[in-house]
Amino acid sequence: MNLNSIIFHTSRLNEIRDFCEGLLELPTGTYIKNNKTQPDYSDDYVNYHLNGAMLCFEYEENRTDMGTIIIDVQEMPSFLERLKEKGIEILQENQHFFKIEDPEGRSIIFVPSR
């Protein structure tokens, strides 16, 4: 089995997008419709395609799903330094992982790619 997607509901989609795309540099996905490549986001959702799995955020006015997201990162030391330069607070850090929080308080743990 392979993980396909994780969906979090959020009442702060624009903030989450700014954080994920601007600060974390996560790539938004695309899909093919009528033989044309389309961006995989709208005013109601965004999908980040991450090596075979999708991290999805869907807008829902009064709902915020919490959880912990774990992301493999190539060149973890340089990625960590870029986040520090952007002013992101590192909550925990060692040679095996580091941890931050998104604007809604979800934990995001970054580990080196295997």
Image (tube, rainbow, N blue to C red):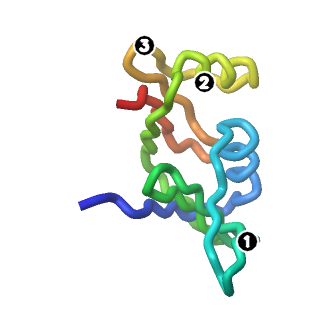
**Amino acid type of the residue that numbered disc 1 sits on in the rendered structure:** Ser
Q: Which residue is mark 1?
A: 42
Q: Is residue 113 left or right of residue 79?
A: left
Which quarter of the image is occupied by the C terminus? Answer: top left
Please state the horizontal and vertical placement of residue 48, each as a whole percent of the image.
Answer: 58, 56
Q: Position of residue 91 (x, y in %)?
A: 53, 22
Choose between 74 and 17: the one closer to the eye: 74
Distance of label 3 from label 2 (alpha carbons): 14 Å
Residue at the (48%, 23%) spot, across then down: 98
Reading the image, the residue beneath label 2 is 79
Residue 99, how many percent across, how many down?
A: 49, 27
**Residue depth check, mark 2 versus mark 1: number of the one nearer the observer:** 2
Q: Amino acid at mark 3?
A: Asn
Residue 21 image point, x, y percent = 71, 46
Closer to the chain start, of discs 2 and 1, is: 1
Q: Which residue is mark 3?
A: 94
Q: Nearer the viewer, residue 29 or 80?
A: 29
Helix, strand or loop at mark 2: helix
Query: Is 111 left or right of 19, judged from the image as shown?
Result: left
N-term-proximal mark, 3 vs 2: 2
Mark 1 element type? loop
